[in-house]
Amino acid sequence: MPFSPYRKLTPYADAAKQRGIGVYHLNIGQPDVETPPAMLAGVQQASIRVLEYSPANGYPSYRRKLASYYQRVGIEVTADDIIVTMGGSESIFFAFMTCLNPGDEVIIPEPFYGPYSAFALATGTRVVPVTSYLANGFALPALADMERAITPRTRAILICNPNNPTGYVYSRQELTALLELCRKHDLYLLSDEAYREFCYDAPFVSALELPGAAEYVVLLDTISKRYSACGARIGAFVTKNAAVRDAAFRFAQMRVSPPGLGQLLGEAAAGLPDNYFDHVKEEYRARRDLLLACLRAIPGVECPTPSGAFYIMARLPIDDAETFARWLLESFSHEGHTVMISPAAGFYGTPGLGRQEVRLAYVINQDALRAAMGCLARGLEQYPGHLLAG
């Protein structure tokens, strides 16, 4: 199993804290936005005498409410199209287990969410990366490049939209082209849509709302980031392909049931007013703009503007991002603090790529974010492997 690219350096962060150094965590997408009180009340006020198993595919009441949520955002599904999962992670795992067999291949634009590699390893499948580039904002690779990666063992294309780690938002045109490619070669299109609500400069389009998507698209979802409820461990595996859904249901039965209390949180979330996301989205937009301004004020830093999610990929003027990230935690502090970042090599499938890139998560408040950027700027100045311009 590969190390998590955003947790790999946790022991060094823990050691820094034991030395009395405060750590600004920009390494992981753990929002500090408050979980909606109505969600917590859904659990606190529930009348529960026995916390029983739920059905393997989730409580019918929650699946109906979740279907209504999808319908409100333009995704025409029913409760029968949904399997409630233990977080988005299990929905991804179910997709690998149902759509691919050992030895099969899945094409993924890189950089990509690091655990995809772990899911492939766990299922005996192989990730085939197709590179996107910082220079053009990590746009979807050329369709010809995607098609050249297809082999007789290819069974699926996996995307994350909006993208983690790049923040890129795929357009309707790009998604339509991907779906046509999948239809042409009889592939599944697996669409991880964990950050759907957080699009700032481009509209969100779900792959499952495209014409002709029913037999090819599997939507992978979670309430974790949408409602700052990462610990609830509630996600969804959504498809109108009955054969895929029935296969996934067998795996759902194997693990018996998704979390009961988490589903109560999810039911309450589905009842939040439509304007709930207005403030949250604007807060993340402000954090993004602050982080971009701070990064672009540092000599030698390159970063495109992400249109969604809450991550920025940046190229730093350093010899090696992992060495730098560890040095920040082991050997550096500024005003009693340091910063934890995610080296980007762990988000690439192609060896050697991302060595000078990092992923930064703008999930802490703006004052803390500004202080963290001060730490990063000072750290770059003092780092022995800093590459001077020219």
Image (cartoon, rainbow, N blue to C red):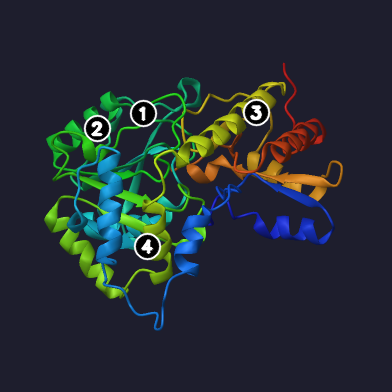
* Mark with earlier residue (3, 1): 1
Name which residue lies at 13% across and 42% down: 186
First along the sequence among labels 2 and 1 = 1
Q: Position of residue 94 (x, y in %)?
A: 29, 60
What type is the residue that disc 1 sits on? Leu
Q: Nearer the viewer, residue 293 or 27?
A: 293
Residue position marked by numbered label 4 in the rendering: 122
Residue for point 49% across, 39% down: 165
Secondary structure at badge 2 equals helix
Q: In the rendered view, would you say 140 is above or below 246? A: above
Q: Which mark is residue 178?
A: 2
Q: Earlier in the sequence, mark 2 or mark 4?
A: 4
The answer to the question of whether label 2 and label 1 lie on touching residues, with beta carbons closer than 8 A, is yes
**Marks 4 and 1, how far apart at CA:** 27 Å
**Of the two numbered discs 3 and 2 in the rendering, the one whose residue sits closer to the viewer:** 3
Q: Are marks 3 and 2 in contact (CB under 8 Å)?
A: no
Comes first in the chain, label 4 or label 1? 4
Residue that badge 3 annotates = 290
Residue type, numbered disc 3:
Leu
Report the Cα–Cα distance between label 3 and label 2.
33 Å
Residue at 35% x, 32% y: name it.
204
Which residue is nearer to you in this view: 382 or 203?
203
Q: Depth-wise, is mark 3 or mark 1 nearer the camera?
A: 3
Please, what secondary structure does the residue beneath circle 3 have? helix
